[in-house]
Amino acid sequence: MMMDLIKNLKKQLNDIPNNYIVLIETSSDQSLELSTAVVKYLSAKHDKGIIVSVNRPYTNLVDIYKKNNIDVSKMFILDCISKNQNAVINAKNVTFLDGVSALTDISLSINEHMNGSKGGQFVFFDSITTMLIHNNPYIFTRFIHNVLTKMRLKGVGGLLISVKGNSNNEIRAEIAQLCDRVITI
């Protein structure tokens, strides 16, 4: 199934420039596989990636990426889960944030690790749906607007995953309007 998802991603994203920001809507039952396929696809295309993980702790993500032959050394992970569970690991490519609702810290960390290098860089949000559960929708929309604007100014592309039907339609419309393309997988 992973290969089918990657083929579908390549087909959908083939003509999209590296600096585009794309919202991908999917079902909850395939969000993990799709997230993994997205990171695999983007890591093959870019030199560096920033992963904002609100669904999986760092150690679990790294295990999944390694099993799927994804070069973890190219990734910087913002882990929004482990610190609250007292599961902090000593690693160079991770920052443990206070939680999914630490939007200022998430924004500052993304900004700190973006550099718009010539080889390309991406930012990947594994679930804006989960982020919306833990944050005021209007504050979250301002946060996303701010982060996506900084990404555009630095020439950094990105992908955001959302579970279909689980978000406020008004907020979804605001976020979709900030993206260059919205696709459903």
Image (cartoon, rainbow, N blue to C red):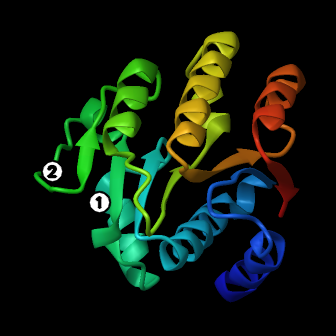
Q: Which quadrant of the figure contains the N terminus?
A: bottom right
Residue 184 visible in this rendered orientation of the protein = yes
Q: Residue at x 66, y 66 (%)?
A: 34
The percent position of residue 148, horizontal first and vertical second, equals 60, 35
The percent position of residue 152, horizontal first and vertical second, equals 60, 41
Q: What number is the disc on residue 168? A: none
Is residue 102 shown above or below 163? above
Is residue 104 shown above or below 57? above
Tell me if 122 is positioned left or right of 2 in this view: left
Nearer to me, 21 or 87: 21
Q: Quadrant of residue 29?
A: bottom right
Neighbour tally class for label 2: few under 14, some 14-19, many 20 plus, Cα within 10 Å: few
Q: Amino acid at mark 2?
A: Ile
Q: Residue at x 76, y 31 (%)?
A: 175
Task: Kindly identify which residue carries mark 1.
Answer: 59
Kindly indicate whether the residue at mark 2 contacts the one at mark 1 (C-beta within 8 angstroms).
Answer: yes
Task: Kindly identify which residue carries mark 2.
Answer: 89
Q: Quadrant of residue 31?
A: bottom right
In the displayed orientation, state which residue is furthest to the left.
90
Nearer to me, 106 or 3: 106
The percent position of residue 155, horizontal first and vertical second, equals 55, 49
Q: Amino acid at mark 1?
A: Thr
